[in-house]
Image (cartoon, rainbow, N blue to C red):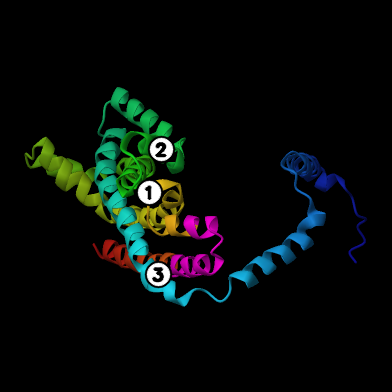
Amino acid sequence: MNGRSFSGKRYRKWVMPVLLLAILAEAAALVCGVRLGSLGKSFISGFSFLAGAIPPDWGAFPELLRPALESVVIALTGTLVGTLVSLLFGLAAASNISPAWLKQTTRLLLGMERSLPEIVILLFLVAAFGLGPFAGVLALTIGCVGMLGKLIGDAIEEIDPVTVESIQAVGAGKLQVMVFGIVQQIIPSVISFALFRFELSIRLSIVLGAVGAGGIGLELYRSFYLLDYHRACSALIVTLVMVLATERLSAFLRKKVRKEGALR
């Protein structure tokens, strides 16, 4: 014991924020109908549901490979096209190479896109183009532009201006400065951003598939809708393997990109 009596004054600045947060959390729980007392019963019901879905339908796995591959292709296509378009938006959104009016307009458009979830975008695209993978690819492409366009724009604003000035000093034109002075510096960052977005697109393709984009998400929806829980369990296993494999591959590639970028 150091002989000093406990005083609440030193903790006074924390009391009000914690108390306010507790009140807000309780109010939100009441509005959302959250009842902690029903958690135990709900857990029991959830485990009973899982027990009813086991074992999975082993014969369904060969049939689920095609929709799983379709989800991967949807995510990959949307990410690739979205990354290329995002590069153009990133160039327009960078304050160090674009005029103020273009930068502000581009940033506004990117912010408006990010305010719309991909599932909302897909609903508009389904109404325009119908159900199918094409609408899913477009939705992921648009979502990719909103996310990567801002990240690429921020990366361009942080580039080393000395390299750009050196290229300009030897008489390079605007296109050469753009390609060799700007784009070449941000290529490792763009690849890293694209790989991270591909991870996200894999998950989104599953959700969008249930809404009408096809792929493994549609198989999940059908299985649950038809109460075929054993097939749904098989689809969940395929989905889990697909997501985990994508995460590991993306993490490995990002690590390689960072290493190569550090060696430059």
Residue 28: x and y in percent read 73, 40
Up-down: is 33 above or below 193?
above
Query: Identity of the amino acid at label 3?
Result: Ala
Residue 23: x and y in percent read 79, 40
Q: Which of labels 2 and 1 is toward the front? A: 1
- Left or right, 63 with respect to 6, comes to left
Residue marked by disc 3: 245
**What residue is drawn where x is 24% and y is 46%?**
84
Q: Which residues are magenta?
A: 221-241
Residue 44: x and y in percent read 74, 66
In the image, 60 versus 162, the foreground residue is 60
Disc 2, SS: helix
Q: Is residue 154 visible?
A: yes
Judge whether residue 26 is colored magenta.
no
In the image, 244 versus 253, the foreground residue is 244
Disc 3, SS: helix
Q: Is residue 254 visible?
A: no
Judge whether residue 236 is colored magenta.
yes
